[in-house]
Image (spheres, helix red, strand yellow):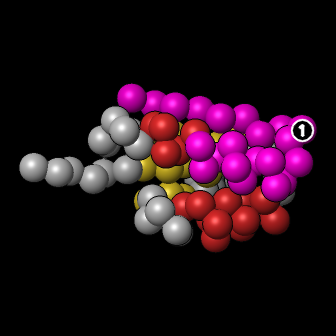
Amino acid sequence: MTHEIDLHGIPHDEAILEVEDFLLRASVNFGFEATIITGNSYRLQRKIMDEVLDVYKFKYYIPSNNLGIIKVRDDRVYG
C-alpha cells in the first residue's frame, strides 16, 4: 500500500511530528511504501532523515528526478 504526506506550509518542528506519526501509523501494514513531499527544503529533509527515518530504521531515498520528495519503504517481515 502506498501512502503520501505533503508538508508544504507546515513549520519544520510540526512537520517532524507529522511525519513520525504518519510513518508509525503506516508501519502497522508491513511492506508499506510512502512518499513524503517536502518541497526543495534540504534542511527539512535532513531533519526528517536524522530525527525520524534513521531513528526508526526506515529505508529511504531521494529520487534524482524529484529532489522535493523522500521515498520510504518498510520491508520488515515477521514470522
How many discs appear? 1
Give the residue at x 37% y 50%: 74
Res. 46 visible in picture: yes
Query: Is residue 18 highlighted in magenta?
Result: yes
The quadrant of the image that shows the N terminus is top left
Residue 76 placement (x, y as % from top left): 27, 53
Query: Is residue 5 highlighted in magenta?
Result: yes
Left or right side of 9 for 74: left
- Mark 1 lies on a secondary structure that is loop
Left or right side of 46 for 12: right
Residue 22 placement (x, y as % from top left): 58, 39
Left or right side of 32 for 63: right
Give the residue at x 52% y 68%: 55
Give the residue at x 52% y 31%: 3
Res. 66 visible in picture: no
Give the residue at x 67% y 60%: 48
* Residue ID for mark 1: 9
54 or 71: nearer the viewer = 54
**Rendering quarter of residue 41:** bottom right
Q: Bounds of the magenta span?
A: 1-21
Q: For label 1, count other residues whose C-alpha is less than 10 Å away and answer few (under 14), some (14-19) or many (20+).
A: few
Q: Is residue 42 above or below residue 73?
A: below
Residue 28 placement (x, y as % from top left): 37, 38
Residue type at mark 1?
Gly
Q: Is residue 9 above or below residue 53?
A: above
Residue 54 placement (x, y as % from top left): 53, 68
